[in-house]
Image (cartoon, helix red, strand yellow):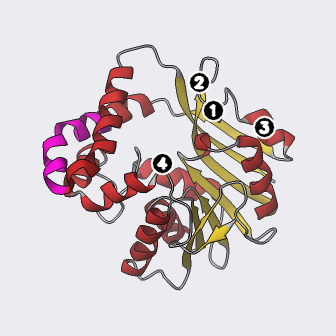
């Protein structure tokens, strides 16, 4: 399903992207914990240049090819990868706020001629069959039906093309309906060959530093954007509290080939 941003149903992530767009203090928190990320790139989660370089290298795409970024958010990571590789970009997100932000960012980066963004369901994008030379997804897969997503990604990818994902896997019985213990059998059953599956060993420490930087700027965020900041602050405080306990999930990065 696709729709113009003004027609698409409200997404639970609209508030998050609205808060990010309006807060200088949030951007300062990102810079404090990921100083190597360019200032124009304002992610909605923990990311550094090493993460982005991994995506660009593992996708193995170049000039004249097209990548699809599923759960693209405000567009920064996908645009960075497109710039690094020379590929064109199609970003897909269920949040109209995210799509608006991503479209504006592409214009600011003079990339509107080879980057476009649309509101669509992760598992039913409405894009043509085999339209992608690569698919990427950063910290979004765990929020959607993994089986529907795997089959949709296979439909989008050309034969021999790659998928690169960073997502969360559960270490205990999954505690949300879309969380799984291991993505490998799901994607293998959908027709993928798994090339790489690694735990991002430093992600926990990096994420706690990121959430601490947000919590330290709570007053500044509220001064800027009022109650819109609550979604960022509450997530940060909840994550810091969970960080005191044994981990229930791990962040992984995997590459698969159609």
The residues bearing labels 3 and 2 have C-alpha atoms spaced at a distance of: 18 Å
First in sequence, mark 1 or 4: give its number. 4
At x 48% / y 48%, what residue is drawn?
51
**Is 234 situated left or right of 106 in this image?**
left
Q: Which mark is residue 179?
A: 1
For the C terminus, give its image quadrant.
Answer: bottom right
User: Closer to us: mark 3 or mark 4?
Assistant: 3
- The stretch of residues the image draws in magenta is 209-224
First in sequence, mark 3 or 1: give its number. 1
Residue corresponding to mark 4: 51
In this picture, is 63 found above or below 70? below
User: Closer to us: mark 3 or mark 1?
Assistant: 1
User: Closer to us: mark 3 or mark 2?
Assistant: 2
Q: Which mark is residue 186?
A: 3
The residues bearing labels 1 and 2 have C-alpha atoms spaced at a distance of: 7 Å
Graded by Cα atoms within 10 Å as few (under 14), some (14 to 19) or many (20 or more), the crowding at tag 3 reads some
Q: Is residue 41 magenta?
A: no
């Amino acid at each position: 399903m696709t729709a113009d941003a003004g027609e698409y149903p409200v997404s639970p992530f609209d508030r998050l992207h609205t808060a990010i767009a309006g807060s200088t203090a949030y951007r300062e928190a990102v810079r404090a914990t990921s100083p190597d990320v360019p200032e124009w790139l304002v992610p909605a989660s923990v990311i550094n240049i090493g993460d982005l370089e991994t995506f660009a290298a593992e996708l193995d795409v170049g000039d004249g090819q097209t990548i699809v970024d599923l759960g693209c958010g405000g567009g920064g990571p996908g645009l960075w990868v497109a710039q690094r590789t020379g590929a064109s970009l199609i970003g897909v997100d269920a949040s109209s706020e995210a799509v608006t932000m991503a479209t504006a960012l592409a214009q600011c980066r003079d990339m509107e001629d080879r980057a476009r963004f649309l509101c669509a369901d992760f598992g039913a994008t409405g894009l043509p069959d085999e339209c992608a030379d690569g698919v990427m997804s950063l910290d979004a897969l765990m929020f959607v039906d993994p089986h529907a997503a795997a089959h949709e990604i296979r439909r989008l990818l050309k034969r021999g093309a790659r998928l690169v994902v960073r997502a969360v896997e559960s270490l205990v019985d999954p505690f949300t309906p879309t969380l799984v213990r291991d993505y490998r059998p799901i994607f293998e059953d959908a027709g993928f060959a798994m090339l790489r599956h690694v735990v991002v060993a430093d992600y926990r420490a990096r994420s706690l530093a990121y959430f601490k930087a947000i919590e330290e700027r709570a007053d500044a965020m509220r001064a800027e954007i009022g109650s819109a900041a609550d979604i960022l602050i509450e997530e940060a405080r909840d994550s810091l509290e969970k960080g005191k306990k044994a981990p229930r999930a791990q962040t992984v990065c995997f590459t698969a080939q159609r």
